[in-house]
Amino acid sequence: MAGETAMRFRVNGRDYQVAAGPTERLLDVLRARLGLTGTKEGCSTGQCGACTVLLDGEPGASCMVLAADAVGREITTIEGIAPPGELHPLQHAFLEHGAVQCGFCTPGMILSAKALLDRKPKPSDEDIKRALVGNLCRCTGYRKILDAIKSCAGSTRGRSKRVKKR
Amino acid sequence: MAEPQMLQPSTLSEAVKALAGRGAVAMAGATDLIPAMRKGEIRPRVLVNLKGIAEMTGVRRTRQGTRIGALTRVADLLDDPIVAQDLPLLADVAAGFASPQIRNLATIGGNLCNAAPSADLALPLLVVDATAEVRGKGGRRKIAMSEFFRGVNRTALRPGEILTAIVVPRPRRRTGMAHAKLGVRKAMDLAFVGVAATIQISPDGKKCRRARVALGSVAPTPRRAAKAEAILEGQLVTSQLIDEAAEGAASESRPVTDLRASREYRREMTRVLTRRALREAFRRAGKEQP
Ligand SMILES: Cc1cc2nc3c(=O)[nH]c(=O)nc-3n(C[C@H](O)[C@H](O)[C@H](O)COP(=O)(O)OP(=O)(O)OC[C@H]3O[C@@H](n4cnc5c(N)ncnc54)[C@H](O)[C@@H]3O)c2cc1C
Ligand code: FES
Ligand code: FES
């Protein structure tokens, strides 16, 4: 396609060389070009949080970032928070607490929560709610999500749990 | 959509040159630009990404006051120690702005240059008499915040001009500031009505020396409420005077009815929120060191 240029992205600690249009969104690069479909597209207008990724450790809406603007940044998606075959403690806690129904909001919820816990390992309930204002869930409800995150307070930094593959 | 080209200048003079090109549009956090491009409201041929321009970043104190680079992100306003000291109202407003996912992208310069009637960051800047520093083909100039907004999505910037920084004068003594915002949700919602106010009191704490009131979402642009200010200045502050000023603000609002709220409701809420903000500003002014 005309206007595509080679760009280098750093995603989940790996470098990828991708040809993309400069105004393609980071969301499109992740899903369509790199096959990282854990990042979801909900509203496409910055309001639902399903497309949340971490940019240099901070949550950002990947539907509101142009690909060319993400070059040179450390991008983390839900696929990158635990080694293959393992779950991050937050992922484990979401399962344990029944905080996942359809799962569409879950990657974004978990990344927002991870960014919070990395910055503030023992957040208050209010801190957690504030960190999640940009993540909408239309099936589970927020109670169980809050409980799952609370159960990880003070314990998640950098560790992940091995889970059995079913 | 024809793909626009993206240029990434690293100095202001390069950016000014790039913006002189046909169909060139400045870009910062792109949180207003991306939706506008997707809806086809704008079709830039060239996007001039300003984010590599060091001169437009950071918050520091200068002789003129506190200088906030136009590229400062809303998230940075929340955390910045200088902003916390010199203009805590701006940090407060930043805390209620969108969500972390948007605050980490959106810039203060983009918020002002987009010039939405609901631009949240405009209100605290209007009530402290901030100044915009701009740079264009004709060199540098300054624009008072109260002259900056010209209409829905229209500013006093000339074609190709760049907002480089906002300068906030040193905090005044015996001055209290407050704001109030009303929307459906506490977060992630454009306000129906936003109000910011400052009151400087006399040394005996009774009179209003200087008042500023700014209104958001109730006119084509964020704007000062001159009537309300005139009612307050030089007078003994009583709860009746504050009611009168709030009434004044409501009478000079020019709200519209849209999906979010009716005209009448917005006007009434302008009165209520102005009263609330003024009372709080007055209370805070009394607590300042004389
Ligand atoms: C989900 C969502 C929630 C939002 N919530 C809020 C909210 O609560 N309150 C609020 O006020 N806004 C809100 N916004 C609007 C938007 O995020 C803000 O207006 C933001 O500050 C724009 O900044 P930006 O850096 O992203 O601007 P851009 O999109 O990069 O630019 C906006 C406009 O300004 C121009 N521009 C940008 N920087 C400069 C400069 N330095 N010099 C000259 N021109 C420039 C661009 O050409 C463009 O026309 C929200 C947006 C979204 C998507
Ligand atoms: S898809 Fe990006 S916030 Fe909804
Ligand atoms: S689990 Fe379905 S949207 Fe949250």
Image: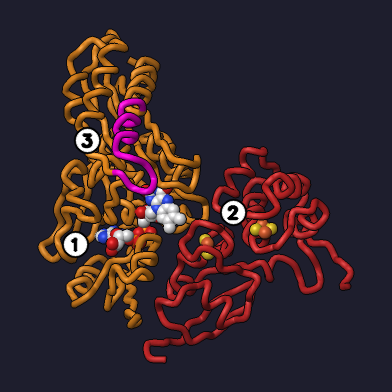
* Disc 1 residue lies near ligand 1 with CB under 8 A: yes
Horizontal relation, residue B26 to residue B138: left or right: right
Horizontal relation, residue B53 to residue A123: left or right: left
Q: What element carries label 3?
A: strand
Horizontal relation, residue B256 to residue B143: left or right: right
User: Which residue lies at the image location 59% right of the left edge and 48% below the top edge?
Assistant: A131
Q: Give the answer, above or below, for where A46 lies relative to B18.
A: above
Q: What stretch is highlighted in magenta?
A: B257-272
Q: Give the answer, above or below, for where B171 lies relative to B236.
A: below
Q: Give the answer, above or below, for where B30 lies relative to A32.
A: above
Horizontal relation, residue B89 to residue A35: left or right: left
Q: Give the answer, above or below, for where B202 lies relative to B102.
A: above
Q: Subunit of mark 3?
A: B
Q: Are marks 2 and 1 on the same chain?
A: no
Q: How far apart are marks 3 and 1 (CA)?
A: 24 Å
User: Which residue lies at the image location 19% right of the left edge and 41% below the top edge?
Assistant: B146
- Tell me the residue that label 2 is attached to: A136
- Tell me the residue that label 3 is attached to: B224
> As shown in the figure, which amino acid type bears the numbered disc 2?
Leu
Q: Quadrant of the C terminus of chain A?
A: bottom right
Q: Distance between the residues labelled 2 and 3?
A: 35 Å
For chain A, what colour was chosen? Answer: red
